[in-house]
Amino acid sequence: MNEKNIIWEHAGKAGLVLGGVSILYMVLTALTGKLAENAGSGLNILLTLVNFLLWIAKFGACTYLMRLFMQRFAKADPAADNSRVFRFGARTALLSALLYSAFYLAYVSFIAPDTFEKALEILQDNPLLGASEMDAVEEMIPRLPTFSFFVNLFYCWLFGTVLSAILSRNIPSRNPFTDEQ
């Protein structure tokens, strides 16, 4: 296989794992959200704390896994330099973002199609929005799932690419006195 196919193959596997972690986080927070709908204020505070801890766990896990996958890629490919490892990380970020964004689109389109309508109900109680602003928001509601797909895709890819740029500076190690990465 040529160089690009090797990078895409490894990035696909890593992207599945990273996207899976983000999807798991989303499912868990959706479940805690369902619990919060039927809970009292004391349990809502606890669930908010749980969601915050889940976010920290997701952030840490994704960062750790990205570093781990980049190190494994560098170890498996003797020709890998910092630039090649960065390209691997950026492709991993793209594929992970694509998987997560597609799941989010499916979630708000089929599993919880009332997500944006619930947000609209909250906005209707806002005295700062006039009738014309509310009409504009109501017109946007049907397009929000698609819009959110692209926003998620861009945000997740950008975050992963920046993380890849940071991590790839030392993968493989630039220290000539060590074989470790």
Image: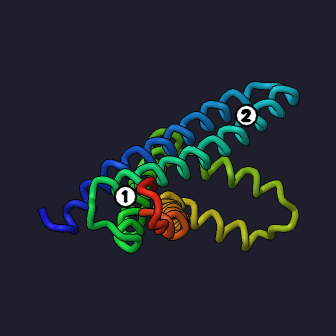
Residue at left offset 44%, top offset 53%: 180
Amino acid type of the residue tagged 2 in the rendering: Val
**Which of these two is toward me, 139 or 104?**
104
Query: What is the x, y in percent for residue 119?
Result: 68, 52
Q: Please tell me which residue is depicted at 73% across the width and 71% down the height of the picture.
A: 133
Q: How many marks?
A: 2
Residue 66 on image: x %, y %: 47, 53
**Which element is circle 1 on?**
helix
The residue where tag 2 is placed is: 50
Residue appearing at x 55%, y 52% in the figure = 63
The foreground one among 147 and 141 is 147
Tell me if residue 106 comes above or below residue 143 in the rendering: above
Residue 42 seen in the current view: yes
Q: Identity of the amino acid at label 1? A: Leu
Label 2: state its secondary structure. Answer: helix
Q: Residues within 10 Å of mark 2 (few under 14, many from 20)?
A: some
Residue 59, x across and y down, in percent: 61, 49
Looking at the picture, the colour scheme in use is rainbow
Q: Which residue is identified by label 1?
A: 95
Q: Earlier in the sequence, mark 2 or mark 1?
A: 2
